[in-house]
Amino acid sequence: MPIDISQLASAARFTPDGHEGVGPVHLFGGAGYDGAVTVALSHYLPGGRADLAPVPAETLYLVLSGELTLTDADGDATVLTALDGARLTEGTPRAVENRTNLPVSMLVIRPNPAAKP
């Protein structure tokens, strides 16, 4: 089995719906990718956000640097800092916002719907 290498310099940018001030790239994922899991690196600028919406599949967030506020459908907010993570089950509504004056980096990990069974 070959080793699948991802290098940030060649990562593909994409624009998810409902996101503003966020610059994500696919480390593993995107068009033609058939691996079981996708990994995106998202950079949230100050004020950057993802609107309240359900996640399409079980999703793991891992904040690499900075501070993000994760808010659930009831309006309960949790601040995640470097190396904090969150697991959201499929369909869980969430909003994400950078309420600081510094950029934030976060990994987003989820199953790939295009993966071979």
Image (tube, helix red, strand yellow):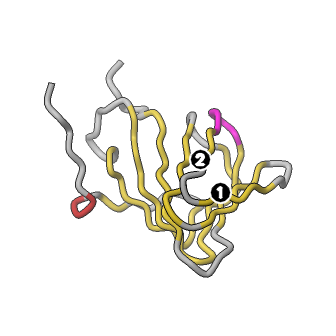
Most frequent secondary structure within the magenta stretch: loop
Q: Is residue 58 magenta?
A: no
Q: Residue furthest top?
A: 117
For marks 1 and 2, give the CA distance. 7 Å
Q: Determine the secondary structure under disc 2.
A: strand
Residue 89 in the image: above or below residue 63: above
| Tag 1–tag 2 contact (CB < 8 Å) | yes
Which residue has dot 1 on it?
Answer: 80
Residue with the mark numbered 2: 85
Would residue 75 be found to the left or right of residue 16 on screen?
right
State the image coordinates of residue 74 (x, y, percent, origin top left): 85, 49
Q: Quadrant of the C terminus?
A: top left
Of mark 1 and mark 2, the one earlier in the sequence is 1
Which residue sits at x=46%, y=60%? 42
Asked which quadrant contains residue 32, the reply is top left
Q: Is residue 115 left or right of residue 88?
A: left
Q: Residue at x 35, y 28 (%)?
A: 115
Q: Quadrant of the N terminus?
A: top left
**Camera-nearest residue between 16 and 36:** 36
Residue at point 60%, 51% (across, down): 84
Q: Nearer the viewer, residue 102 or 47?
A: 102
Q: Which mark is residue 65?
A: none
The range drawn in magenta is 88-92
Label 2: few (<14), some or many (≥20) within 10 Å?
Answer: some
